[in-house]
Amino acid sequence: MAAKNHFSFLFLLLLQLQLFYSGRSDLQLNYYAKSCPKAEEIIKQQVMDLYYEHGNTAVSWLRNLFHDCVVKACDASLLLETVVGVESEKESERSFGMRNFKYVNKIKAAVEKECALTVSCADIVALSARDGIVMLKGPHIEMKTGRRDSKVSYSQLVEELIPRHNDSIINVLSRFQSIGIDTEATVALLGAHSVGRVHCVNLVERLYPTVDPTIDPEYAKYLKGRCPTPTPDPNAVLYSRNDRETPMILDNMYYSNILKHKGLLLVDQQLVSNPLTLPYVKKFAADNDYFHAQFSRGILLLSENSPLTGDEGEIRKDCRYIN
């Protein structure tokens, strides 16, 4: 009887794993090779053109991928606008500071001109992130495609599913592990904080009324210069760069900085104080190539989280609205 129960348990476990990875396995390299062979090159060219015109777009593409894929699935639900009775995920406080959505529409329009109703917005989110990472001097990632677009917004789940900047690192690790991303890959993905900037509204709790003792004192003085009030206007452009040395290069300087107690966010500094994550911080700080390898692995795991494939969802004509 015990052997039979053990077999039943293993069967159920294997079935669950199959369901978890089934969507991932339906994605494939060069998915549009026949239906729209120029699709990936068009997206890449658009990303490059936008980068040279507006450099910050590359960071936006990377953040889009995170915000889309962590909430339910990689299905472009993030891009849907608010319509009667349904709020956009972009309206959530967790989406504060996100921008450049209008340029996603520009990329989509270029692809639609070549191949109408063929390339999903979800794949545009994924591929623009891939190409944006290269523009930030990060690694080239062989990314699979074949995602389809959600017909619904998951705005009610955003606050629950996207980790906060002041969450405990244990909660962050748990959230990523729930979508199949292990501790090392999670620490690598947080290395995306090497680029872009953090608004003062997300920093001031570490500076006022007293400075967080885990922040380097000289760095704290610099941050107070950037954020001179404990109640910054969220509509004002008050921020600090994640990495002052190489602010637009996706490199391992982030890990060197947090080892020197120069992390901007509470979650950044917790990577050093937690024994589960500190060894990876040290490894990445010592070897940029190794960081890039683990970052690539993390991006692939993230980008393949529960995608809609096959006959699921749809291919939106306009990324902002369902067909």
Image (cartoon, rainbow, N blue to C red):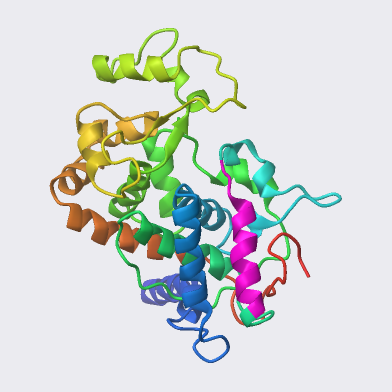
Q: Quadrant of residue 282?
A: top left
User: In this orientation, does residue 13 appear?
Assistant: yes
Q: Residue at x 58, y 89 (%)?
A: 35
Highlighted magenta segment, given as a residue range: 98-113
Position of 234 compared to 87: left or right? left
Q: Nearer the viewer, residue 291 or 301?
A: 291
Find out whether residue 105 is within the magenta segment. yes
Position of 211 compared to 167: left or right? left
Residue 201: percent from the left, percent from the top?
A: 52, 24
Residue 171: percent from the left, percent from the top?
A: 43, 39
Find out whether residue 108 is within the magenta segment. yes
Residue 71 to residue 112: above or below: above
Position of 271 compared to 109: left or right? left
Q: Nearer the viewer, residue 193 or 55?
A: 55
Query: Which quadrant does the C terminus fall into?
Result: bottom right
Q: Residue at x 31, y 50 (%)?
A: 250
Main SS, magenta region, reads helix
Residue 184: percent from the left, percent from the top?
A: 28, 52
User: In this orientation, does residue 120 appear?
Assistant: no
Question: Which residue is the extreme one toward the top?
Answer: 209
Q: Residue at x 55, y 14 (%)?
A: 231
Question: Which residue is the extreme one toward the left?
Answer: 286
Question: Which residue is the extreme one toward the front?
Answer: 53
Question: Which residue is the extreme one toward the right?
Answer: 84
Q: Nearer the viewer, residue 223 or 281?
A: 223
Query: Which quadrant does the N terminus fall into?
Result: bottom left
Residue 203: percent from the left, percent from the top?
A: 44, 24
Q: Nearer the viewer, residue 308 or 140?
A: 140
Residue 204 to residue 104: above or below: above
Q: Residue at x 60, y 20 (%)?
A: 233
